[in-house]
Image (cartoon, grey):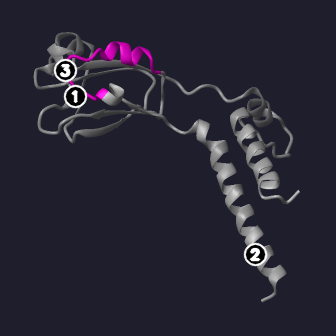
Amino acid sequence: MSKSSSNSNSNDHILLVVFIISGLAVLTPILATDHIVGANRGWNPGQNYTLWANNQTFYVGDLISFRYQKNQYNVFEVNQTGYDNCTLDGAVGNWSSGKDFIPLNQAKRYYFICGNGQCYNGMKVSVLVHPLPSPPKAAVSAHNSSSDAAVLVVPQQGFRALVVSLAMLCFGFGWV
């Protein structure tokens, strides 16, 4: 195998890797978010989960996850009455693994409480889930047009990532 053939093969692999990374960078902004209740403090008594929830924006398809000591606490999804009164009446789901990932699949208000009495010590959280934002106008008009031509719509952040990746590829590897 000649040296130029080997270099060409290596360059093709590098281009493929950069292309894949660029593609992932474009898709990253539209992936779901995992909201960890209480952030680094987790699901424990004495936390202000209302303040935490008010600093989050939840969309359909996101996850809400609860981290806690498995044998000490749990999570119940309840209705507003159960939330307000710290009761399990009308519970629609319960989790107790200590690392619970709950999909937020509908645009509505969700209510979660700890079911072992700790709700009275603040272990409850209510989150409002919003519908997904509308697609960019360019995507809507391209979809509604009668043209058969395909239109590539790249989110602004993804486009920046693609440009930076290509610049790094060209200038970082000294090919230009």
Mark on residue 9?
2
Residue on which the image places disc 1: 76
Q: Residues within 10 Å of mark 1 (few under 14, many from 20)?
A: many
Q: Quadrant of residue 122?
A: top left
SS of the residue at dot 1? strand
**Mark closest to the chain's N terminus, 3 or 2:** 2
Mark on residue 45?
3
Q: Residues within 10 Å of mark 2 (few under 14, many from 20)?
A: few
Image location of residue 33, percent across then percent down: 48, 34
| Residue range (magenta) | 41-56
- Determine whether, in the image, residue 110 is placed left or right of residue 60: left
Q: Residues within 10 Å of mark 3 (few under 14, many from 20)?
A: some
Magenta run includes residue 12 = no
**Vertical arrangement, residue 127 with respect to residue 69, above or below:** above
Magenta run includes residue 47 = yes
> Along the line of sight, which residue is nearer the eye, 118 or 171?
171
- CA distance separating discs 1 and 3: 15 Å
Q: Quadrant of the C terminus?
A: bottom right
**Vertical arrangement, residue 42 with respect to residue 172, above or below:** above
**Mark closest to the chain's N terminus, 2 or 1:** 2
**Point 71% across, 35% down: residue:** 155
Q: CB atoms at circles 3 and 2 under 8 Å apart?
A: no
- CA distance separating discs 3 and 2: 58 Å
Q: Quadrant of residue 144?
A: top right
SS of the residue at dot 2? helix
